[in-house]
Image (spheres, rainbow, N blue to C red):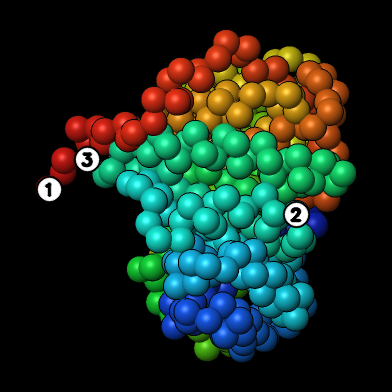
Amino acid sequence: MINAKDILETLMMIQEEHLDVRTITMGISLLDCIDPNVNAACTKVYDKICYKAQNLVKTGEQLEREYGVPIVNKRISVTPMAMIAAACPKDSPVLFAKALERAAQTTGVNFIGGYSALVHKGFGPGDRALIESIPEALSVTDHVCSSVNIGSTKTGINLDACKLMGRIVKQAAEKTADRNCIGAAKLVVFCNAPEDNPFMAGAFHGPGEPDSVINVGVSGPGVVSAAIQKAGNCNITEVADIIKKTAFKITRVGQLIAYEASKRLDVPFGIVDLSLAPTPAVGDSVAHILEAMGLQSVGAPGTTATLALLNDAVKKGGVMASSHVGGLSGAFIPVTEDAGMIDAARSGALTIEKLEAMTAVCSVGLDMIVVPGDLPAESISGIIADEAAIGMVNSKTTAVRLIPAIGKKVGEELNFGGLLGTGPVMPVNPNSPAAFINRGGRIPAPMQSLKN
């Protein structure tokens, strides 16, 4: 039974501790839009998205008013567009990106994800053409996000795709250099990409998903940090218990919003993603949670251990609060989007090497990291391969979202504003992996893949 104490506690979480529903994301299958005539296919894509999502933003705003819970983003994810573009091999896939952009503008959503390709075992029809078109597609659109899955525990890592994506990431930054390299900030390279992820830039609607679905991503790093600080000098087991109880409360809010959105939109409820997604706002930082556990600064010895505890406790608390949990679920560590991470990167307490170690135990990977604009494409490919190896061997999702800051050097800053935040250009090991990357081929799947 809901009592006055629970209501007041939730109000405090919203008003003072930055509790929000980070996103309601509607996944839409576009498989029935495939047509060898590119203009007909683009029309079908636009029409279906606009029909399915015509009330998405309005419903989200109604739920905000009725429940008093901020819903920061309303988003759409679609079938990986390489599958749709494969039927039109002579036409530019950018035409589909423009159709997605028009649909995003018509429906009023913040972002639309799914300009994507799944190439973890090799390139199928349409894949290479779409990947080559990503820099242009992201430069001529404002709302479209892109992702490419280059590896998995079951298949190994497509090293040819790693090599290609190093160049594509750099080109995406170069084509939008006049806009703070925003193209690269809308592009994610995955290993073990989930089909039901509601968070951008990596969201796409997997082939195994229903025709349409509602997925919700909750957040609340500030709530967790405040709970730990209120607990005072308790032992680490008690800290874990506090995080579990707090994650339960946060997730119940997300479950409520997901259920109501599903019912009102007459679209099946998919999953609640439990991820703690930070923002640059003071008091809304995953880094500050780790520091509340006792670190002088995130990046100090002990950082990976505290992050492992946080990630595990969030999942344990959240799974009891929702009927279906999915997506990424855990703790995000995007550098430019987290006030504590930004401070640690500026001071030198946090390095890319330490961030890589942290990704072995967090919910995703090397996220929103600004690197020098003259970093060779092969070095970007090497970072992608390293991160994919962590995901492959540990049977978890990992991802890379690097932003080469064109024209900027280590110590300078790139400022996106809003949720994407700001961050310093971080140094990268200058030694080259080019000979390794240029070998190509496929890194074999690990023994963990043989579970049948």
Are the residues at dot 2 and dot 3 in contact (C-beta closer than 8 Å)? no
Residue 388, horizontal then vertical, whole percent: 43, 34
Sequence-earlier tag: 2 or 3: 2
Kind of residue indicated by mark 1: Asn
At x 83%, y 34%, the residue is 414
Please identify the residue farthest to the top as the structure is shown: 431
Q: Is residue 248 above or below residue 87?
A: above
Kind of residue indicated by mark 3: Ser
Q: Name the residue under label 2.
A: 139
Mark 1 lies on a secondary structure that is: loop
Q: Mark 1 points at which residue?
A: 452
Determine whether, in the image, residue 112 is placed left or right of residue 344: left
Question: Are there few (<14), some (14-19), or many (20+) residues within 10 Å of tag 2?
Answer: many
At x 57%, y 50%, the residue is 132
At x 56%, y 26%, the residue is 378
Say which of marks 2 and 3 sits in front.
2
At x 32%, y 35%, the residue is 442
Along the line of sight, which residue is nearer the eye, 32 or 339?
32
Q: Is residue 28 above or below residue 43?
A: above
Q: Can residue 151 be seen in this view?
A: yes
Determine whether, in the image, residue 364 is placed left or right of residue 134: left
Mark 2 lies on a secondary structure that is: helix
Residues at marks 1 and 2, CA–CA distance in whole angstroms: 44 Å
Kind of residue indicated by mark 2: Ser
Residues at marks 1 and 3, CA–CA distance in whole angstroms: 8 Å
Residues at marks 2 and 3, CA–CA distance in whole angstroms: 38 Å
Question: Are there few (<14), some (14-19), or many (20+) residues within 10 Å of tag 3?
Answer: some
Q: Can residue 321 be seen in this view?
A: no
Mark carried by residue 145: none
Along the line of sight, which residue is nearer the eye, 65 or 193?
193
Say which of marks 1 and 2 sits in front.
2
Q: Name the residue under label 3.
A: 449
